[in-house]
Amino acid sequence: MRVLAVAVTAAAAKSTEAQLANPIRRVVSLLQSMQSKIEAEGEEQDKMFSKFQCYCEKNAAKLSDAVSEAKSKIESLATDIESAQQDRAQTVADLANAKENRASSQQAIKDATSQRDKDAAAYKEMADDLSTNIAALGKAIPAIEGGMGGAFLQTQGNVLRRVLE
């Protein structure tokens, strides 16, 4: 407690002394106080600047690496894009060719189907005609054999005998 009383008394004496001091002394004190504050701020700024400079030096290498990596990636992506465009162009050409082949194949199928239908109709007509002829011959042969008996053959034989005699 005694120390506190001494400190308060000393502070009061100093403030009264500062108030009683002459104005030039006050200006000098003020300038000295400003000088110490400015020097402290300068030291603080120097510390901050050195930290910032260290940060910049460390990150400059990282950034330059990142930039070079990004440039190489850009080149790689450009190559990939060009390759994809070529693949797309080839695919489009293949698709157009496939559509053309499909259309010609469908036309060939239609033509072949039409030809088969014509052939089938011609076959059916000929088969019907031949069936009719076979049926007629099937009836005619027994009728001829039954109606003439063997006379037809004998007649021819007789005619041949006469011619030979």
Image (cartoon, rainbow, N blue to C red):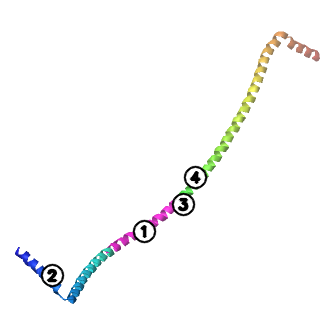
C-alpha gap between disc 2 and disc 3: 83 Å
The reply, left or right, for residue 40 in relation to residue 119 is: left
- The residue most toward the left is 2
Q: Residue 82 carries which label?
A: 3
Q: Name the residue under label 4.
A: 91
Local SS, label 4: helix
* Three-letter residue code for mark 3: Glu
User: Mark 2: few, some, or many residues within 10 Å (few <14, many ≥20)?
Assistant: few
Residue 88: horizontal and vertical position, in percent?
56, 54
Q: Mark 2 points at which residue?
A: 15
C-alpha gap between disc 2 and disc 1: 62 Å
Q: Residue, x 16% and y 86% (percent of image)?
A: 20
Whichever of labels 1 and 4 marks the residue nearer the N terminus, that label is 1
Whichever of labels 4 and 2 marks the residue nearer the N terminus, that label is 2
Indicate which label's residue lies in the foreground, 4 or 2: 2
Residue 96: horizontal and vertical position, in percent?
62, 50
Q: Does the magenta segment cover residue 12?
A: no
Local SS, label 2: helix
Indicate which label's residue lies in the foreground, 3 or 1: 1
Q: Mark 1 points at which residue?
A: 67
Q: Does the magenta segment cover residue 61?
A: yes
Whichever of labels 2 and 3 marks the residue nearer the N terminus, that label is 2
User: Mark 4: few, some, or many residues within 10 Å (few <14, many ≥20)?
Assistant: few
